Image: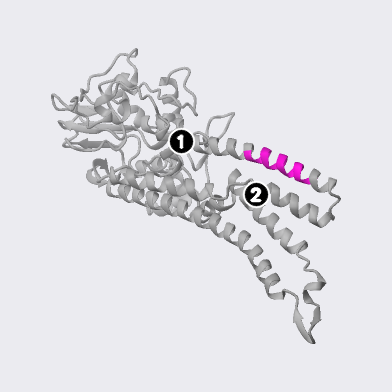
């Protein structure tokens, strides 16, 4: 609920519990209100002080164990009478709760101050990684990529420091009175072949990373395009002017604040967590996005008992759900990250978890590294017994060590996952990370009692 969330632009004092408005916020509010600076500052201070009083009153109404950073959804809004709600929010409702005629809702000036305090009505998205940083990470990071780049570096170092053609290759020998070059062409061809391996391996690593990056970027772009197509339409809202006159407006969802009075109809997507003030008989909402239950749930404006959990209260409707039947007049009581859906989003923002494929490849690389070191050690011992030259000894040991690395594994795995991802697209499934395809293939048993939601919301079997 909104009263448990600290404001983004205002600092709270630990001792007094009061808020101090920064000059930048005052200046912003002055420009928005279009008032003289002195008048605007005094008016804004009064509104912010009023918001603090609301927060303090709501804190007393919240459960005793509720904390400011609480991830569980806890509120007592469903147990409060509408008249008391109006006093707490400093908003206005009509006697019948319909708010169809006469002054209702927040004053515009107060709503602007609340917006500065509580921020836009949207769930904070996860931080998106820069696409070029993502490409660099896919190219140079990862334990298997590091092993392959180590092979490239080792091959380049051997060619750079130990490529010493014998002087006999460049000397001329007299045979039958004619000078001939002792296999100079063959030696140059052999040297040029040695440079092909590290170059080709580098190209394979970069090309594989670019293929994976391109596939995942296409999936992300498609998901963003779908999200934009599903944008929320403006919400019918009622507010009051400075003189108390009624203002019927169409507000964007992001501009809603706690205390706003909104009107919902069948087919509307609920734009925030709301308390129902009035609704037609038989009103129903679809909460399957939150609860997983495909059956519609009835709604009514009656005040619930304190023992009733808010998630089961029938006078509340939640952000992200839909109105299936009926009309309603509601007051917004939570927005953005403080909504029920926002709390769920916060709870799943955990640290990155390695996929099954990454765990398996990491285990495989460790196994290969152990074998490669063992083979290299045996090769070194053999050369020591043969009393070989140091340069020859290092070259032979390095070649024996890095010959154990399967350079073709990385492109093989990536291309196979790309084919699987393409097959999923044919079945209307977007794969944001191609590693998830392999994880899905590892599933052997799937247990669920939400059959209606997992299919089409219809309790049928075919």
Query: Does 170 appear in magenta?
Result: no
The C terminus is located in which quarter? top left
The N terminus is located in which quarter? top left
Q: Which residue occupies the extreme front position in the image?
A: 176
Return the residue nearer the eye: 193 or 278: 193
Q: Is residue 389 above or below residue 186?
A: above
Return the residue nearer the eye: 338 or 55: 338
Q: Is residue 200 above or below residue 168?
A: above
- Residue 64 picture location, percent across and down: 47, 17
Residue located 40% across and 20% down the image: 61
Circle 2 SS class: loop
Most frequent secondary structure within the magenta stretch:
helix
Query: Does 373 appear in magenta?
Result: yes
Q: Is residue 284 above or below residue 257?
A: above
User: How much space separates mark 1 and mark 2, taking CA atoms?
Assistant: 73 Å
Residue denoted by label 2: 403
- Residue 407 picture location, percent across and down: 57, 50
Return the residue nearer the eye: 349 or 255: 349
Mark closer to the observer (1, 2): 2
Q: Is residue 18 left or right of residue 424?
A: right
Residue 28: in sight, yes or no? yes
Q: Which residues are magenta?
A: 368-380
- Residue 342 picture location, percent across and down: 40, 34
Q: Is residue 137 left or right of residue 89?
A: right
> In the rendered structure, which disc, 1 or 2, sits on the residue that comes first in sequence?
1
Residue denoted by label 1: 49
Residue 80: in sight, yes or no? no
Q: Is residue 396 left or right of residue 212?
A: right
Q: Residues within 10 Å of mark 2 (few under 14, many from 20)?
A: some
Q: Is residue 190 left or right of residue 101?
A: right
Marker disc for residue 376: none
């Amino acid at each position: 609920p909104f009263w448990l969330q600290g404001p983004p632009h205002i600092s709270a004092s630990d001792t007094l519990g009061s808020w101090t408005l920064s000059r930048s916020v005052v200046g912003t509010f002055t420009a928005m209100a279009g008032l003289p600076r002195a008048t605007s500052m005094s008016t804004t201070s009064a509104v912010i002080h009023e918001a603090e009083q609301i927060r303090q009153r709501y804190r007393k109404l919240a459960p005793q164990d509720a904390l400011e950073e609480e991830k569980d959804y806890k509120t007592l809004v469903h147990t409060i009478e509408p008249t008391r709600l109006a006093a707490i929010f400093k908003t206005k409702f009509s006697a019948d709760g319909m708010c169809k005629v006469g002054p209702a809702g927040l004053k515009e000036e107060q709503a602007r101050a609340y917006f500065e305090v509580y921020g836009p009505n949207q769930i904070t998205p996860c931080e998106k990684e820069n696409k070029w940083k993502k490409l660099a990470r896919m190219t140079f990071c990862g334990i298997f990529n590091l092993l392959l780049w180590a092979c490239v570096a080792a091959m380049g170092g051997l060619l750079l420091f130990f490529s010493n053609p014998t002087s006999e290759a460049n000397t001329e020998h007299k045979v039958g009175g004619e000078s001939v070059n002792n296999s100079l062409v063959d030696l140059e061809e052999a040297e040029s072949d040695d440079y092909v391996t590290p170059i080709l391996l580098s190209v394979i690593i970069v090309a594989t990373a670019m293929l994976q990056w391109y596939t995942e970027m296409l999936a992300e772009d498609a998901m963003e395009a779908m999200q934009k197509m599903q944008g929320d339409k403006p919400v019918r809202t009622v507010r009051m002017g400075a003189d108390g006159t009624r203002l019927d407006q169409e507000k964007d969802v992001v501009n809603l604040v706690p205390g706003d009075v909104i009107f919902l109809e069948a087919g509307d997507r609920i734009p925030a967590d709301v308390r129902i003030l009035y609704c037609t008989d038989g009103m129903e909402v679809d909460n399957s996005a939150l609860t997983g239950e495909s059956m519609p749930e009835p709604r009514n404006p009656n005040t619930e008992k304190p023992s009733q959990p808010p998630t089961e209260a029938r006078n509340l409707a939640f952000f992200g759900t839909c109105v299936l039947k009926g009309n309603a007049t509601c007051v917004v009581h939570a927005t953005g990250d403080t909504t029920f859906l926002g709390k769920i989003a916060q709870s799943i923002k955990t640290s990155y978890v390695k996929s099954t494929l990454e765990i398996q490849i990491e285990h495989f690389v460790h196994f290969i590294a152990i074998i490669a070191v063992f083979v290299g050690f045996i090769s070194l011992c053999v050369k020591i017994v043969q009393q070989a030259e140091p340069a020859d000894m290092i070259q032979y040991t390095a070649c024996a060590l890095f010959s154990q690395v399967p350079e073709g594994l990385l492109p093989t795995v990536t291309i196979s996952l790309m084919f699987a991802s393409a097959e999923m697209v044919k079945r209307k499934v977007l794969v944001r990370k191609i590693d998830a395809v392999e994880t899905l293939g590892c599933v052997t048993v799937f247990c669920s009692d939400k059959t209606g939601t997992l299919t089409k919301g219809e309790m049928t079997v075919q």
